[in-house]
Image (cartoon, rainbow, N blue to C red):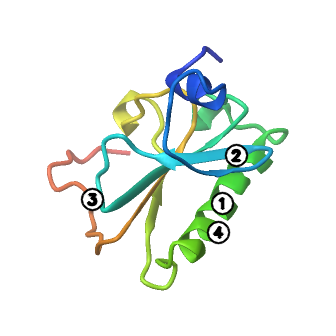
């Protein structure tokens, strides 16, 4: 299920993005529709469609997303105040781009639960 997405085009520099971090495996850029004073997306350069597609062979790429989040939080001086990282999965989880990505939000106090109008699901 690895189709080209807008993130692939950003990785390939086919469309612009406000890139704030890049290494061999990871790219981070500011979200174009920020939900907090600071809102970035941290993505693996290798396309993985959803959390359901993470395997033991590619799980190090997901771990690196969190390493990058911690590095950015320290560099941007909000590590001590705190921040939120979120990864959505599939339609009901709020995923709109099918290339896994970590949302990193900071710059304000985050409430919990994040959504007040959620419907309870019986498990």
- Name the mark nearer the viewer: 3 or 4: 4
**What's the CA distance linking mark 2 and mark 3?**
27 Å
Q: Residue at x 40, y 55 (%)?
A: 39
**Residue 112 picture location, percent across and down:** 28, 68
The answer to whether residue 79 is left or right of residue 53 is left
Instruction: Identify residue for label 3.
Output: 114
Q: Is the Cβ of the residue at disc 1 closer than 8 Å to that at disc 2?
A: yes
Callout 1: SS: helix
Q: Is the Cβ of the residue at disc 4 closer than 8 Å to that at disc 1?
A: yes
| Residue 113 higher or lower than 123, as above or below | below
| Residue 70 higher or lower than 56, as above or below | below
Instruction: Identify residue for label 4.
Output: 71
Q: Is the Cβ of the residue at disc 3 closer than 8 Å to that at disc 4?
A: no
Give the quarter of the figure containing the C terminus: top left
**What's the CA distance linking mark 4 and mark 1?**
5 Å
**What's the CA distance linking mark 3 and mark 4?**
24 Å
Q: Residues within 10 Å of mark 3 (few under 14, many from 20)?
A: few
Q: Is the Cβ of the residue at disc 2 closer than 8 Å to that at disc 3?
A: no
Who is closer to the viewer here, 30 or 96? Answer: 30
Point out which mark residue 68 bears. 1
Give the quarter of the figure containing the N terminus: top right
**What's the CA distance linking mark 1 and mark 3?**
23 Å
Q: Residue at x 52, y 78 (%)?
A: 79
**What's the CA distance linking mark 4 and mark 2?**
12 Å
Q: Which tag, 1 or 3, sits closer to the chain's start?
A: 1
Q: Which tag, 4 or 2, sits closer to the chain's start?
A: 2
- Name the mark nearer the viewer: 2 or 3: 2
Q: Which tag, 2 or 3, sits closer to the chain's start?
A: 2
The answer to whether residue 105 is left or right of residue 8 is left
Callout 2: SS: strand
Callout 3: SS: loop
Instruction: Identify residue for label 2.
Output: 26
């Amino acid at each position: 299920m690895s189709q080209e997405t807008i993130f692939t085009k950003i990785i390939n520099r086919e469309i612009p993005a406000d890139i704030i971090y890049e290494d061999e495996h990871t790219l981070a850029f500011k979200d174009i529709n920020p939900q907090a004073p600071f809102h970035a997306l941290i993505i693996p350069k290798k396309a993985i469609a959803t959390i359901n597609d993470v395997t033991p062979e590619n799980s190090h790429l997901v771990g690196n997303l969190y390493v990058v989040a911690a590095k950015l939080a320290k560099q941007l001086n909000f590590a001590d105040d705190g921040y939120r990282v979120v990864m959505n999965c599939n339609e009901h989880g709020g995923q709109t781009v099918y290339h896994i990505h970590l949302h990193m939000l900071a710059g304000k106090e985050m409430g919990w639960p994040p959504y007040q109008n959620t419907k309870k699901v019986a498990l």
